[in-house]
Amino acid sequence: MAESLQPHALVIGETKNSHQVSQRLHLRGYQLHENPGRPTGRNSAKWGVIVAVKQGLFNVQNLSLPDALRGRAVALDLSISTVNHRTFSHRLIGAYAPWDPGGDDDAVLFWPAITDLCNTAPYSWSISGDLNVSLSTMETSSSMPSLTRHLYTLFLRNTNAIDLWQTQSPVDIRHDWTYRSHDSTSLSIIDRCATSRIGILSGSIEVPNFFIPVTDHRPISSLIVLSTPDSADMPYLPSEPPPSTYSPLCLRTTHSNIVTNPSQIFSLTLPGVPSLYLAIDLPGKTYY
């Protein structure tokens, strides 16, 4: 899927390895940032997230994260250049959220830590990945309540964020599902993208027509249109290299799970900025 879409960024979740495995991906032309999984035994681990960013498009700063996000998230500040020799920042977060917020102390701290990351972003931000939550009964065929719905709703409120699935026309779980239970008895939308209101003009999300085997998830595709800050607040860049003549910025993220869970594609578009395409790819879940 990455070779076909040629995304500007790729997020991989649930590597299930406590050691760095990003070098095994052989993603030519990408800069890889990894938060390895947590060991659960001598030869086993859980979680693990990788974000790969296309080289030559951004200046990238990999943020240090609290222990509550160890193995759960990667956060990058992308410095984006405009044709006016200015730069602005977009904070990109790839995440694999807890499905049981009461599972351990760090699970309880996950959404507060993500909230802090978003509220301290220099300008716009987005989070994309397997967020393990359905927000409404229209997003799931399961009769079981979502354990994380309250925490995710609180996150959206505390960050003044927009969940892109909530901006779409009424979803049809038969076509828009991103997760199917192992016994195929229930379908849900739990792979999501949320964005800040500041610096975002519009956004959309859908499930693209990609088949990824050995997974209980499907990829999703999101498009975000960015706006620049006031030029007075943007750092000035030297005139060399010359400004790009590319089309307006399109940052697209594909989130899909390598092992059992393809989940998400995401894009951003910005007037007056080179065209960009970002993809986030996360591996699969073995339970929900």
Image: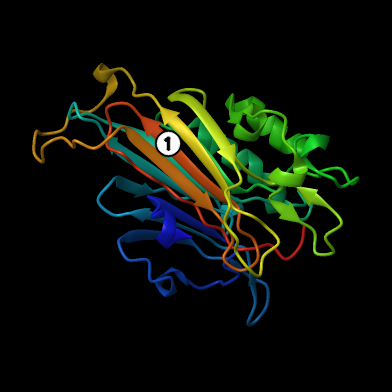
Question: Would you place residue 190 above or below residue 197 in this image?
Answer: below
In front of the other: 209 or 27:
209
Q: Is residue 138 visible?
A: yes
Q: x%, y% of residue 73?
A: 54, 52
Question: Would you place residue 101 above or below residue 139 in this image?
Answer: below
- Most distant residue in the right direction: 143
Q: Secondary structure at mark 1?
A: strand
In front of the other: 21 or 83:
83
Relative placement, left or right, of 259 versus 136 is left
**Residue at (54%, 44%) from the top-left corner?**
221
Q: x%, y% of residue 18?
A: 56, 71
- Most distant residue in the bottom direction: 42
Q: Quadrant of residue 128?
A: top right
**Residue at (39%, 33%) from the top-left corner?**
269
Residue type, numbered disc 1: Leu
Q: Quadrant of the C terminus?
A: bottom right
Q: x%, y% of residue 237?
A: 16, 33
**Residue at (37%, 50%) from the top-left corner?**
8
- Most distant residue in the left direction: 240
Q: x%, y% of residue 283?
A: 59, 63
Q: Is residue 195 visible?
A: no
Relative placement, left or right, of 196 versus 165 is left
In front of the other: 35 or 185:
185
**Residue at (70%, 31%) from the top-left corner?**
154
Read off the residue under disc 1.
268
